[in-house]
Image (cartoon, grey):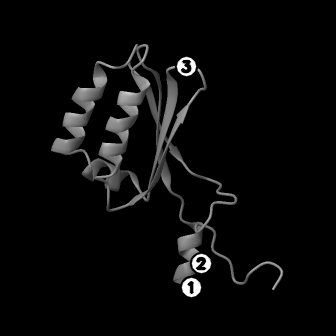
Amino acid sequence: MSEFFDFLKHKYAFVAVGEFKPGCFGEARQLYEKAVSTYSKGFKGAYLLQEPGTEKGIAVILWDNIEDMDEHKNEIYNQTLSKIAHLYAAPPVTSFYEVCSEIGLPGEIKSAGAVGS
């Protein structure tokens, strides 16, 4: 029965949409990857998207719950924010979302049996 309730439990997503100064996206990506690699408890994955040919991007970080995300706001988090802040053309727009649908994510979808078996 707990698997059923785990299936119904939704993740949360931290989303940041921003634009970097010309030529700074690569450095920002390295800092993002370094910061995300330190996450553990409650961390479910991260995506960094770049609009082709631009310095615009979207960062999506998935968490079990908002409290887990807040626990990762530590010294490394603060150092990374200070290193990345000057790279932005303007401050990013950030939001929190509840993940209400997940379709086709490998290893994430639980089912009672395999399709076609």
Report the Cα–Cα distance between label 1 and label 2. Answer: 5 Å
Report the Cα–Cα distance between label 2 and label 3. Answer: 43 Å
Check whether the beta carbons of the residues at disc 1 and disc 2 lie within 8 A of each other.
yes
Q: What residue type is labelled 2?
A: Phe
38 relative to 108, above or below: above
Q: Nearer the viewer, mark 2 or mark 3?
A: 3
How many other residues sit within 10 Å of disc 2, few (<14), some (14-19) or many (≥20)? few
Label 2 element class: helix
Task: State left or right for residue 33 relative to residue 60.
Answer: left
The quadrant the C terminus occupies is bottom right
Indicate the position of residue 74 as horizontal and vertical percent values: 19, 45
Q: Along the polypeptide, which appears first: circle 2 or circle 3?
A: 2
Image quadrant in which you'd find residue 27: top left
Image quadrant in which you'd find residue 4: bottom right
Front residue of this view, candidates 24 and 42: 24
Q: Which amino acid does label 1 sit on?
A: Met
How many other residues sit within 10 Å of disc 3, few (<14), some (14-19) or many (≥20)? few
Label 3 element class: loop
Residue position for label 3: 54
Q: Along the polypeptide, which appears first: circle 1 or circle 3?
A: 1
Residue drawn 41% across the image and 29% down it: 26
Q: What residue type is labelled 3?
A: Thr
Indicate the position of residue 13 as horizontal and vertical percent values: 48, 46
Indicate the position of residue 38 as horizontal and vertical percent values: 28, 52
Give the number of the disc on residue 1. 1
Residue drawn 63% across the image and 68% down it: 109
Residue position for label 2: 4
Image quadrant in which you'd find residue 79: top left
Q: How many labels does the image show?
A: 3
